[in-house]
Amino acid sequence: MKKNEISILGSGLIGSLLSIYLKKRGLDVHVYEKRADNRKGEYKEEGRSINMALSDRGWKALEKAGLKEKVLPLTIPMYGRKIHDEHGNTSFMPYGKEGQAIYSISRGKFNHLLMDEAEKEGVQIHFEHKIEEVDLRLNELSVNNPENGSETISSEVIIGADGAYSSLRNAMLKQVRFNYKQEYISHGYKELSIPATKEGEFAMDPNALHIWPRGSFMLIALPNPDKSFTCTLFLPFQGERVSFENIRDEKDIKGIFQNYFHDAFLLMPNLVKEFFGNPTSSLINIECYPWMLNKAMLIGDASHAMVPFYGQGMNCGFEDCYILDGLIDKIGTTAWELVFAKFQKIRKPDTDAICQLALENFEEMKNEVADPKFLVRKNIEARLHSLYPREWVPLYTMVTFSDMPYSEAYAQGKLQEAIMDKVMRDPLITQNWNKMDYEDIINQLDKAKSV
Ligand SMILES: Cc1cc2nc3c(=O)[nH]c(=O)nc-3n(C[C@H](O)[C@H](O)[C@H](O)COP(=O)(O)OP(=O)(O)OC[C@H]3O[C@@H](n4cnc5c(N)ncnc54)[C@H](O)[C@@H]3O)c2cc1C
């Protein structure tokens, strides 16, 4: 029977980056990926080519692997949200301080680059090798490949980076005292696009993440280097007037876009074809524990799949790789159980926190950003941050532009939220926010922290 030193399940974003980290240590790393190698043709994953927002935690992990400079040319900086109202008016809300941005990147192209880099390091990626079963007692994989059929592969270490429907997690589910929680939210999503103009230019500002918030649903758009935008439409599956179940034909979809997203509609010549041609996908939150058994461990979405509303799933998975690598630096590669045990203990409170924040941010994105008071609230927080940069850091900044543990960001964010809720109760806040006593707000925060 073939025996590997390290078997990673899945060559998605997290499996690929992790394979690079481990291979750089001189380990024998094999990656098993159920899909075919899609680097040869143009990348298109059945209308799910969604682009991602890469932010500080992700960049830090890429930098440690020596990949930052290679990834940068694939990205477009987005300095803030551009909110589109129902009349086509737009307003801009910076994400952070001047110059701070999150970076739009195509998931497919990014994944190709990481797989190329992994292979350059000497990682062996076995495409069309689906993990059917994992024997946790023997650390053996049952792998199916169309050419050779089923084979059993033994492995010193198994790492499950095989996403939200992980085969390794399925095996762990059968163990006693394994906790598992999954929740599909009411909404699903569909990919659409805004092509470049006839003149070959961007049809909208490329340096922003565009949002059309409409209460119970929303549309977003992220820029691509070819001057198009990838849009994602989030709708409830059913129950509401505007829902996937109530869009049955061309008239329905055009009616909704003309009514609610008119400025975007004018830029979307392929709307009908894409809406009915692209799949409708669901959104899931998954939490489980423990993540390890002996020398097998889960990482990335396999251990903590979150809804995409904080733009952190991939960034968090990359941070997993960074933290795991730091533990290997300290403990070495001869005590994997210890490395894995420490990893899950450190990391679980943080991934719980970001899963929760991602669920909460859904409300903010589809609803609150459309409220003019929301902009005032953000302005107050930005002012507080500029006056007291260490004392008051907006939650979005802590999550997106720092590497503070997510659980600490969550706790600090809750204290600030309670204070801001109080501040916003002032009926004259929209007029007075400029002249407020900011020192008093910081004192309130200090007091809240000391309780
Ligand atoms: C609409 C949407 C938008 C998002 N936007 C952002 C964003 O802006 N920023 C951000 O940070 N995150 C974002 N995310 C989250 C991000 O996509 C995920 O967190 C990230 O892709 C997780 O990577 P992964 O490698 O853990 O899992 P995956 O990307 O799911 O990769 C798993 C891999 O394992 C393979 N596999 C699965 N089962 C098997 C098996 N049995 N055998 C062999 N191979 C297998 C799969 O084919 C796949 O290649 C978004 C997610 C969605 C849905």
Image: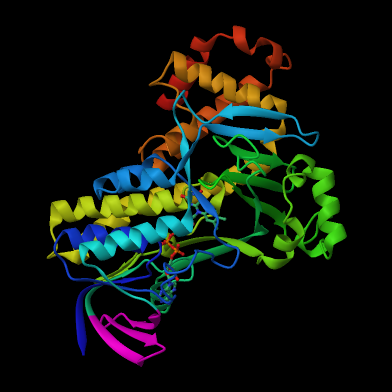
| Total marks in image | 0
Rendering quarter of residue 437: top right
Residue 432 is situated, as x and y percent measured from the top left of the image, at 66, 10
**Above or below 367: residue 449:** above
Residue sitting at 64 percent across and 52 percent down?
232
**Residue 451 seen in render:** no
**Residue 422 seen in render:** yes
Residue at the limit of the structure toward the front, as seen here: 199
Q: Where's the N terminus, which quadrant? A: bottom left
**Above or below 367: residue 20:** below
Frontmost residue, 394 versus 10: 10
Is residue 428 located in the magenta-colored stretch of the structure?
no
Frontmost residue, 59 versus 317: 59
**Above or below 268: residue 95:** above
Most frequent secondary structure within the magenta stretch: strand
**Above or below 49: residue 426:** above
- Asked if residue 249 lies left or right of residue 309, the reply is right
Query: Magenta stretch?
Result: 128-154
Residue 289 is situated, as x and y percent measured from the top left of the image, at 40, 63
Frontmost residue, 436 versus 451: 436
Frontmost residue, 87 versus 326: 87
Residue sitting at 51 percent across and 64 percent down?
181
Residue sitting at 43 percent across and 53 percent down?
314
Residue 120 is situated, as x and y percent measured from the top left of the image, at 24, 62
Residue 443 is situated, as x and y percent measured from the top left of the image, at 47, 15
Rendering quarter of residue 247: bottom right
Is residue 133 located in the magenta-colored stretch of the structure?
yes
Q: Where's the C terminus, which quadrant? A: top left
